[in-house]
Image: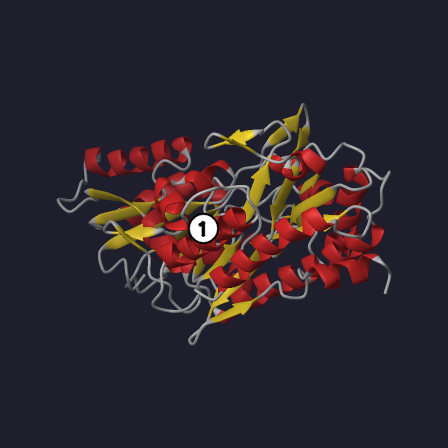
Amino acid sequence: MQWMGANSIAILPAAEEKVRSHDVNFPFRQDNNFWYLTGFNEPDAVMVLIPGRKQAEFILFNREKDPSQERWHGKRLGQDGAIEQLGADDAFPIDDIDDILPGLMEGRERIYFALGANSEFDQKVMEWRSELMTSPRKRTDSPGELIDIGHHLHDMRLIKSTAEVQRIRHAAKISAKAHKALMKACAPGKTEREMETELHYHFAKGGCRHPAYPSIIASGDNANILHYIENSDSMKDGELLLVDAGGEYEQYASDISRTIPVNGRYSDTQAELYDVVLKAQLAAIEKVKPGNHWDHIHDEAVRVLTKGLVELGILKGQVSDLVKRGVYRQFYMHKTGHWLGLDVHDVGDYHLHGEPRVLEPGMVLTVEPAVYIPRDMTRVEGHNIAKKWRGIGIRIEDDVLVTANGYDVLSKDVPKEREAIEKIMAGA
């Protein structure tokens, strides 16, 4: 509201319930912007902010208490609960919004709302505004300017509070336990689906009822499909298993990737390539500190990866030239990370005014270099790729908080050194 300024109003709807099939809905998940501002986890609600209004600055429209409906579908907070538990200054039944909200908009110069996020709600805002402008008692200062609240709200979400960091840290700690349980359970002949089940059980057991995103459990050549989610194949002796999975705690995501040997021991070939990726990740994490920017992190990962691929004979040429020409993209086609928060790929600009965004304390991001060499990839830059490298995909990813003096790896409880992983898988 300080940012919005006087003579303005912000209107933001809750998420809608979505039909899965016939009369069965998908599990309800609140809109992240709405959750960020209210902490309210019911559908059929609208939040209103009116800076400087003496009667009420934070107003919530929500469902009324209804014992009959609550017996079937669960408890509702109601209007009194919205005031007592959410700190709303006032609350009204959602069914009364058409009668009340236009009056709240009257006299406001600017309307902030999530333009384009919900076309039906956009239309409602236009109707309320039109009602004011065509009313016989129309005021000369009826709302004129319509402003998308998303950009500035996303900038707020980019810098995490202590409470937000605590939730991401908790999600990462629970996810770390799940990853370690998977390592202990992994063995040739088991299926990717069994490993997925192991993960999700430990997510839920630790309070992360839902994964933050569809879990990737990719064995063998499946690891070279970046967003592989079938998780249906049997795991074979001698293969690697790439696991990209994280739990969600109170809507805050974790996002962790580890690549482990199905039989508990990395082969010499796997170990050589794994160490290149790990070295790149460790070097990239060292670039996470206030004053550095996204390109520092990605460029360092690319440099170390390219150098390692040259040393292994997978690429040939001068490292600087290979980097300049982007040859590494044939093995590493994505960026080295993304923002993390209420969304697993969280909101917030990566560039400002054409320049990479400078890191600030409170930002949380992932660092996830990788190398992918599909089984059918036989040549690059005119020379052959040795058969021993083909069919290997490796990604190592951690969740990293930018601190005042550097960084804090929130997912550090999951081992990533080869010896430590092998020790866990051996049952030690």
Residue 92 visible in the picture: no
Task: Name the one closer to the observer, 7 or 119.
Answer: 119
Can you give x and y, in whole percent of width and height, for residue 295 in the image?
Answer: 37, 54
Q: What's the residue at 87%, 61% (across, down)?
A: 427
Q: Which residue is mark 1?
A: 302
Q: Residues within 10 Å of mark 1 (few under 14, many from 20)?
A: many
Q: Amino acid at mark 1?
A: Val
Q: Residue furthest bottom?
A: 405
Q: Quadrant of the N terminus?
A: bottom left
Helix, strand or loop at disc 1? helix
> Which corner quadrant of the image does residue 406 belong to?
bottom left
Can you give x and y, in whole percent of width and height, for residue 362 in the image?
Answer: 44, 67
> Which corner quadrant of the image does residue 202 belong to?
bottom right
Q: Residue furthest left?
A: 140
Q: How is the image coloured?
A: secondary structure
Left or right, 380 with respect to 215, comes to left
Left or right, 21 with respect to 17, comes to right
Task: Name the one closer to the observer, 36 or 10.
Answer: 36
Q: Quadrant of the C terminus?
A: bottom right
Q: What's the residue at 20%, 33% (across, down)?
A: 134
Q: Say above or below: 362 vs 14.
A: below
Q: Say above or below: 184 vs 160.
A: above
Q: What's the residue at 12%, 44% (across, down)?
A: 140
Left or right, 378 with respect to 52, comes to right
Can you give x and y, in whole percent of width and height, for residue 281 in the image?
Answer: 54, 58
Can you give x and y, in whole percent of width and height, for residue 285 in the image?
Answer: 50, 63
Residue 134 visible in the picture: yes
Total numbered labels placed on residues in the image: 1
